[in-house]
Image (cartoon, helix red, strand yellow):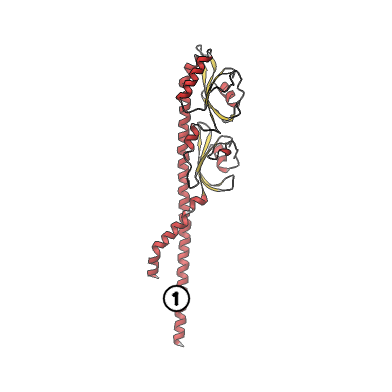
Amino acid sequence: MDFYKRFTLRFWLIFLYSVSTSLIVLSCGAGIYFVVKQVIAEDILDINRAYSEKMAQTTDLLFLSMKKNLETSAGEIASLLEGRQRLQGDLKRLQESTMFFNSILVANSKGKILATEPDMEIVGKFLLSSGAREALEKKKTIVSQPYKAITGRLIVLVSTPLWDKNGNYAGFLGGTFYLEQDNTLHELLEKHFYEDGSYLYVVDEQGMIIYHPESERIGQTVDDNIVVQKLMDKKSGAERVVNTQGIPMLTGYTYVPAVNWGIVSQTPEEEALAPTLKVVLDMFAYISPFLFCFS
């Protein structure tokens, strides 16, 4: 009987010890899991924030180069406004010497198209688009917001004014790139699409997508996205957000003052945090022999 009592007591002591040890281990494991998960999430947010900043700086430099390219050519182009053949030849040389633009055009002070390269059969027509009107009104080097051109394309116009020999405004020289086709901006941005689902997209000041790795998304307005709303308010940062397709994302975003655009770099949260459980299990695999020895 004493033996039976001792055996029963020993059994319950071992059982309680095992249960308490298991609960401690599981509690530690759960705590470590959530800590590791938080650390990984914060690291991904920092990476995406830093990357969006880098791409914003690169985009800013790209547009600065575009503006300088046009400004350098403006003087020579202005002197050729009366001769279309020579003007066309100079536009062709300018187009061939730069990789920035899908097309180049010259318009007079009334917005009448004098020449284009390549030839789009619109010479003699008047530009009525918002981008052209802005160029004619401001009479300075500017980057337009995206708009539908006379050709029906969704474009951005980079323009610089032309002045005649008497210092009078004579029109503008403009370079365009088509948002729905390959161009220098696409080449710059599309290299940054990763196997873990990370990707980068760009919105204008109205919340319209002007670059996205899924080209069919270009032209869509996503101003109900909280990150896009913050970019429209000229803010930058990083946070977890559920995108317009209902997918949780770890997102970094940067406002680009030079063009009033926002650049967003993001990673699907599920894919970003997928390694968390493996990290915790690997850690327990290393320490389990020690736990066994001390138990």
| Residue extending furthest toward the top | 166
In the rendered image, which quarter contains the C terminus?
bottom left
Where is residue 141? Give x, y as percent: 51, 24
Give percent across and percent down for residue 42.
47, 49
14 over 253 or under it: above or below:
below
Measured along the vertical axis of the image, is residue 34 above or below residue 13? above
Element under disc 1: helix
Q: Residue at 56% across / 30% down in the picture?
A: 155
Q: Where residue 132 sits in the image (x, y, percent)?
A: 58, 24
Residue under the image location 44 percent in, 86 percent down: 3
Q: Is residue 269 above or below residue 121?
A: below
Q: Residue at coordinates 51% horizontally, 18% vertically from top-left?
A: 88
The kind of residue tagged 1 is Ile
Residue visible at 39% across and 63% down in the picture: 287
Q: How many marks?
A: 1
| Percent coordinates x, y for residue 24 in the rendering | 46, 66
Q: Nearer the viewer, residue 159 or 228?
A: 159
Name the residue beneath numbered marker 1: 14
Q: Residues within 10 Å of mark 1 (few under 14, many from 20)?
A: few
